[in-house]
Image (cartoon, rainbow, N blue to C red):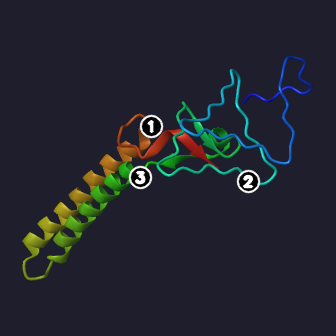
Amino acid sequence: MLSPKFPFDGNQIVLTSDRVTLHSKNDGVFLFGKGMVALSSTQTINLDANEKILLDCQKIELGHRAEKLGQPILLGTSFIDNMILLLQSLQEAGSLLSSVNESNSATSFINISNAGNTIYSTTSRLMDILESKDSPQNPLSKVTFSR
C-alpha cells in the first residue's frame, strides 16, 4: 500500500475550508492519481449510489492486511450449489434409510448400503471441490478478503 509523502516537496494544490463540495451538474466527478487516491476521515466515509457501487481490481481487502490476516469471502452461489448437492444426497440417503425394516432384511441391507454409497460419493466430491483452490465450484473468493 502506498502512503502519502509528508512533507511533500513537489507542486500541489491545498484547499482548506469548513466544507468543500464538488458537484457535476450533467456528468461525473473524476479523481485520478498515478500512485494512489486516498479518502480519509476521522469519523465516516460514505459511498452512496442509487444503482450500484463497483470496485474493480485484482485484490479487494476489507480490513487492514485482510488477505494476509483474514479470510476469503464466501461466494454465495457456489456455496449454495454445493450445499444443495449435499442436502439432496442426505435426503436421498434418509429416504433409503427410512425404508429399512425387519420384515425385509435383504432389501434393508441394500438400502443401507445404497445410502452409505450416496453419502460417501457426494461428500467425497464436495471434499475434492473444497480442497482444490483452483476448482471453479470452490466457494472461496480468490479476489476479496475480509478480517
Judge from the rendering whether residue 9 lies leftward or rightward of residue 55; answer left or right: right
Q: From the image, state whether disc 1 or disc 2 is nearer to you.
A: 2
Give residue 47's position: percent from left, percent from top.
62, 49
Q: CA distance from mark 3 to mark 1?
A: 16 Å
Tell me the kind of residue under disc 3.
Answer: Gly
What kind of residue is marked 2? Thr
Q: Dot 1, how many residues are within 10 Å of its Cα: few (below 14), some (14-19), or many (20+)?
A: some
Q: Is residue 114 above or below residue 105?
A: above
Q: Amino acid at mark 1?
A: Lys
The residue lying toward the viewer, choosing from 91 and 97, is 91
Front residue of 66/27: it is 27
Q: Which residue is mark 1?
A: 133
Q: CA distance from mark 1 to mark 2?
A: 36 Å
Which comes before the other along the chain, label 3 or label 1?
A: 3
Q: In the rendering, which numbered label is found on residue 44?
A: 2
Pointer 2 or 3: first along the chain = 2
Measured as percent of width and height from the top left, residue 99 is found at 14, 76
The spot of residue 35 in percent (x, y) is 71, 23
Q: Residues within 10 Å of mark 3 (few under 14, many from 20)?
A: few
Element at label 3 = helix
The answer to whether 37 appears left or right of 101 in the picture is right
Task: State yes or no: discs 1 and 2 in contact (Cβ < 8 Å).
Answer: no
- Identify whether 20 is placed above or below 114: above
The quarter of the displayed image where residue 14 is located: top right
Residue bearing mark 3: 76
Q: Label 1's element? A: loop
Contact, CB < 8 Å: mark 3 with mark 1?
no
| Residue drawn at 19 percent across, 77 percent down | 98
Quadrant of the rendering where the N terminus is positioned: top right
Q: Is residue 76 left or right of residue 73?
A: left
